[in-house]
Image (cartoon, rainbow, N blue to C red):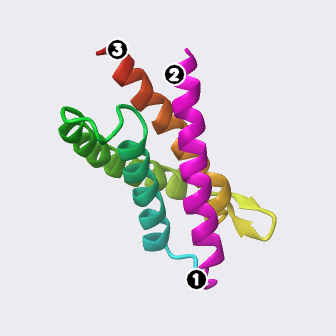
Amino acid sequence: MNNILFGSGKGVVIGLVVGVLFAVLDTGHHMFGTKLFLFAVTGVLTGILCGTPIWRREALTSNVIKAGVGLIVGLLLMTALYYLLDFELGTRRLSSHYALVSPILGALYGAFVEFDDKSM
């Protein structure tokens, strides 16, 4: 249980860093491709940095697979958010609040990666 919370915390930090970076670099054009890229980067970094440390010899292959799965999960979650749950939140759409939605993805995927590592 502690590992799942730790993985979730790491995912929140990764998502927050990526989300704030995207918010700082925001050009005002909230295009779907930019949002997909945000979630893809968050998923890949969470897959690489959560779970087994990348410097272990046997972890390289599994971390590359987790990064690929994180890419797919990020793209699918952003697509679902954009088309199904995207409502007005203040003056912008929910998916345009990068520093809010990216840590949520990081927390969910980070907890899954830690759970997956501990179940092996």
Q: How crowded is mark 2: few (under 14 residues within 10 Å), some or many (20 or more)?
A: some
Res 118 quadrant in image: top left
Residue 63: x %, y % from top left:
28, 41
Rounded to the nearest angstrom, the CA distance separating label 3 from label 1 is 42 Å
Q: In the rendered image of this protein, does residue 3 appear above or below residue 102?
A: above
* Residue 102 in magenta stretch: no
Name the amino acid type tagged 3. Answer: Ser
Which label is found at residue 63?
none
- At 35% from the left and 46% from the top, the residue drawn is 48
List x then y, in percent, for residue 120.
Answer: 28, 15
**Residue tagged by mark 1?**
29
Mark 3 — residue?
119
Mark-to-mark CA distance, 2 and 1: 38 Å
Q: Which of the two marks, 3 or 1, is nearer to us in this view?
A: 3
Q: In the depicted view, which residue is nearer to us: 32 or 10?
A: 10
Say which amino acid is labelled 2. Answer: Asn
Q: Of label 2 and label 1, which has the lower sequence position?
A: 2
Provide the residue designation for mark 2.
3
Q: Give the SS element for disc 2.
A: helix
Indicate yes or no whether the magenta region holds residue 5: yes
Residue at left offset 31%, top offset 47%: 67
Residue 29, compared with residue 100, is above or below; it is below
Mark 2 and mark 1 residues within 8 Å of each other at the beta carbon? no
99 lies left or right of 72: right
What residue appears at the point 26 percent right and 48 percent down from the top-left corner? 68
Q: Is the magenta stretch mostly helix, strand or loop?
A: helix
Report the mark closest to the observer, 2 or 3.
2
Residue at figure coordinates x 42%, y 22% from the top left: 115
* Element under disc 3: helix
Q: Does residue 108 appear in the picture of this structure?
A: yes
